[in-house]
Image (tube, rainbow, N blue to C red):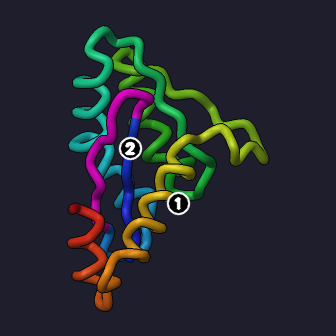
């Protein structure tokens, strides 16, 4: 199971369960409902900055176009090549995964894992 999540220095956003591999079109279905609403709440002043890595769905033509169209709502920062340590979500995701895997009893099915992620 894969998940998509978003965070800021102040708050965690939604964790979205992905039933299949993330593609540019699937990513585009997440951005308007989940990223845009999170950014508008967290950064209602319009000064929010969004950083993502260069994964293929993130850099897809449709996602890039959507981010450009919404550049007045928040700024999209280009991810420098080979810079994995810039994104705080990696550390948060690792900590979340560690906490879920070390639950007692540990999750045994994808649904158990999803339930633990939400708890």
The image position of residue 10, as x and y in percent, is: 37, 28
Residue at screen point 25% across, 23% down: 40
> Is 78 positioned to the left or the right of 46 in the image?
right
> Is 81 positioned to the left or the right of 97 in the image?
right
The image position of residue 26, as x and y in percent, is: 35, 60
> Is 18 positioned to the left or the right of 94 in the image?
left
Task: Quickly name the residue at label 2.
Answer: 6
- How many numbered marks, from 0 up? 2
Residue at screen point 34% across, 75% down: 103
Range drawn in magenta: 8-17
Please give the label number shown on residue 94.
Answer: 1
**Inter-mark Cα distance, 1 to 2:** 14 Å
Q: Judge whether residue 14 is colored magenta.
A: yes
Q: Secondary structure at mark 2?
A: strand
The image position of residue 96, as x and y in percent, is: 42, 60
Residue situated in front as seen by the camera: 55 or 8: 8
Q: Is residue 7 above or below residue 58?
A: above
User: In which quadrant of the rendered image does the N terminus lie?
Assistant: bottom left
Q: Quadrant of residue 4?
A: bottom left
Disc 2 packing (10 Å; few <14; some 14–19; many ≥20): some
Main SS, magenta region, reads strand
Which residue extends farthest bottom? 108
Which residue extends farthest front? 104
Disc 1 packing (10 Å; few <14; some 14–19; many ≥20): few
Q: Judge whether residue 110 is colored magenta.
A: no
């Amino acid at each position: 199971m894969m998940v998509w999540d978003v965070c800021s220095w102040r708050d965690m956003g939604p964790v979205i369960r992905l039933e299949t591999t993330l593609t540019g079109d699937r990513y585009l279905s997440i951005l308007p409902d989940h990223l845009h609403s999170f950014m508008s709440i967290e950064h209602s002043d319009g000064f929010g900055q969004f950083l993502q890595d260069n994964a293929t769905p993130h850099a897809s033509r449709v996602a890039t176009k959507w981010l450009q169209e919404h550049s007045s709502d928040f700024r999209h920062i280009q991810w420098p090549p080979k810079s994995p340590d810039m994104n705080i979500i990696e550390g948060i995701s690792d900590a979340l995964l560690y906490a879920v895997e070390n639950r007692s009893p540990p999750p045994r099915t994808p649904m158990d894992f999803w339930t633990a992620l939400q708890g």
